[in-house]
């Protein structure tokens, strides 16, 4: 097994011991990886779309429904207290996971998309005036582009777009040039879902803060795969999704500095987000309840907490190194196949490999690979401006998680070689 194995340092969660990073034993925690597809052992390389769930997550969700299911913050009965404890415990786990200063800086939302929309609606819209500017980058997922476009169109503000090099690295010189007295916010992805580029977000934040501009980081592809410390990054907002972080769908997180979120108005009204309501006046609850109107995804939060505890139990640096090593190995194997071009050659890359073939359209590649038991994503990956910049309509994308193996990367390469045979 070509894997970096080393004893883990003590985990962040109190009382949790990390185990040495061992892919074979980690795979046993993910029941779905034993599946066969079209008679072949499943090779799941679509982790950037959604990651598989360890048994601990599945058990935590079913246990919640089996034993403690109740609504939160409302009942005085025992089950409601247990459910409230589990939900607020999940918030504490996320605070630890991101190293946020306070639990009230953690807002539960549906996913990264909703987190970014919350900031666009409740922070940006009230602030933006005609000719103000929001800086985004050409690498952004539509979730970190469209909400800003909508906010700009509603207010007369403009988007400014940081370009990239042909290797897929952001042009920091251009970024600095784009920052101006008109800039109200910078919104940048931590890791590109389409190319895998790891952006220098700490530097991006530093440059923005030098001009007094706050920064939102879209961490949808980073939080699952690297250690994130929002205080060290000093970002103002950080968004991620539970389902890409080995947790369930329907739950995600917005981290925001309390000093920015305290003055923000709520963006949705309803139960649990008020302190008092009369016919004449509504007073809002304090953070984080102000941004969590209605019954939240309680079981989702419980599942996310279980995913975080699972991640705290493995050596995350070894896991990140393993994912990156798998992706670089896959790139090398794919590049050896005539007619395959790997897109995105940034020096800092996560476990994502995007490629095109002269012989076949990405959708054909995906279909052939599926029949070989290899699950990848094909298409524009919700990054159409980036596809235009690359001059392609779509790519084939293999995205790795720490439970993937070098043998699976070999199966990917063999399946792509088969595409080459079939399509000439
Ligand atoms: N990218 C992909 O296959 P949601 O859908 O809210 O969980 O995450 C949105 C999102 C935001 N930012 C980035 C960088 C992302 O990669 C994603 C989701 C998936 O690449 C599905 S389109």
Image (cartoon, helix red, strand yellow):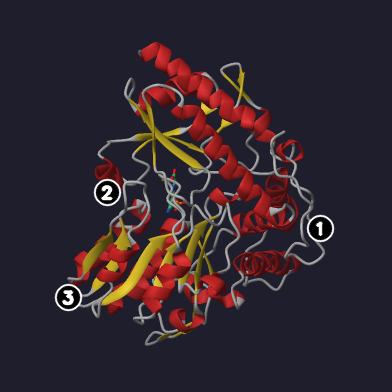
Distance Cα–Cα, label 2 vs label 3: 24 Å
Circle count: 3
Mark 3 crowd level (few <14, some 14–19, many ≥20, 10 Å Cα): few
- For marks 3 and 1, the one nearer the N-term is 1
Judged by depth in the image, the label closer to the viewer, 2 or 3, is 2
- The residue indicated by pointer 3 is 130
- Disc 1 crowd, CA 10 A, few/some/many (<14, 14-19, 20+): some
Does residue 318 appear to the left or right of 339 in the view shown?
A: right
Residue positioned 42% across, 12% down in the render: 421
User: Which quadrant is the N terminus positioned in?
Assistant: top right
Q: Is mark 3 within 8 Å of ligand 1?
A: no
Q: Earlier in the sequence, mark 2 or mark 3?
A: 3
**Rendered position, 123 above or below 163:** below
* Residue behind mark 1: 17
Residue 364 location (% of width, % of height): 37, 22
Query: Quarter of the image holding residue 74?
Result: bottom right
Seen in the picture, residue 246 relative to 77 is either above or below; the reply is above
Mark 1–mark 2 Cα distance, whole angstroms, equals 44 Å
Q: CA distance from mark 3 to mark 1?
A: 53 Å
Crowding around mark 2 (Cα neighbors within 10 Å: few <14, some 14 to 19, many 20+) is some
Query: Is the C-beta separation of discs 1 and 2 under 8 Å?
Result: no
Q: Could you tell me which secondary element the residue under label 3 belongs to?
A: loop
In the image, 79: left or right of 367?
right
Q: For residue 125, what is the image quadrant?
A: bottom left
Please, what secondary structure does the residue beneath circle 1 have? Answer: loop
Whole-percent x and y of residue 333? Answer: 51, 28
Query: Residue 164, image x and y in percent?
Result: 31, 54
**In the image, what residue occupies the spot 46% across and 25% down?**
336
Asked whether residue 267 is in view, the answer is: yes
- Tag 2 residue: 385
């Amino acid at each position: 097994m070509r894997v970096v194995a080393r004893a883990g340092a003590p985990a962040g969660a109190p009382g949790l011991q990390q185990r040495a990073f061992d892919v074979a034993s980690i795979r046993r925690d993910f029941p779905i990886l034993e599946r066969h597809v079209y008679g072949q052992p499943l090779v799941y390389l679509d982790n950037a779309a959604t990651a598989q769930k360890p048994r601990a997550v599945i058990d935590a969700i079913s246990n919640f429904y089996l034993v403690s299911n109740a609504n939160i913050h409302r009942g005085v009965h025992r089950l409601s207290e247990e459910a409230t404890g589990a939900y607020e415990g999940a918030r504490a786990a996320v605070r630890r996971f991101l190293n946020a200063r306070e639990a009230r800086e953690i807002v539960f939302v549906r996913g990264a998309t909703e987190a970014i929309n919350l900031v666009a609606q409740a922070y940006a819209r009230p602030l933006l005036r005609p000719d103000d500017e929001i800086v985004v980058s050409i690498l952004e997922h539509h979730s970190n582009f469209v909400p800003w476009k909508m906010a700009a169109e509603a207010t007369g503000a403009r988007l400014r777009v940081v370009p990239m090099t042909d290797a897929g690295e952001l042009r920091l010189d251009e970024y600095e040039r784009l920052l101006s007295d008109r800039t109200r916010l910078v919104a940048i992805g931590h890791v590109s879902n389409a190319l895998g580029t790891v952006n220098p977000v700490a530097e991006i934040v530093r440059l923005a803060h030098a001009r007094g501009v706050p920064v939102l980081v879209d961490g949808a592809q980073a939080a699952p795969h690297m250690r994130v410390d929002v205080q060290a990054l000093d970002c103002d907002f950080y968004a991620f999704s539970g389902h890409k972080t080995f947790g369930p769908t329907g739950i995600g997180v917005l981290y925001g500095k309390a000093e920015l979120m305290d003055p923000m108005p709520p963006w949705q009204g309803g139960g649990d987000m008020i302190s008092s309501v009369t016919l004449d006046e509504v007073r809002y609850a304090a953070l984080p309840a102000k941004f969590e109107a209605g019954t939240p995804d309680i079981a989702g939060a419980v599942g996310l907490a279980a995913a975080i505890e699972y991640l705290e139990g493995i050596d995350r640096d070894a896991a990140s190194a393993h994912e990156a090593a798998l992706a670089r190995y896959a790139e090398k194997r794919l590049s050896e196949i005539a007619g395959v071009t790997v897109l995105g050659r940034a020096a800092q890359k996560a476990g994502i490999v995007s490629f095109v073939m002269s012989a076949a359209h990405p959708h054909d590649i995906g279909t052939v690979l599926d029949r070989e038991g290899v699950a990848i994503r094909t298409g524009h990956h919700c990054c159409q401006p980036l596809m235009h910049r690359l001059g392609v309509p779509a790519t084939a994308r293999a995205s790795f998680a720490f439970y993937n193996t070098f043998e699976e990367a070999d199966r990917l390469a063999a399946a792509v070689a088969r595409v080459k045979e079939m399509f000439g």
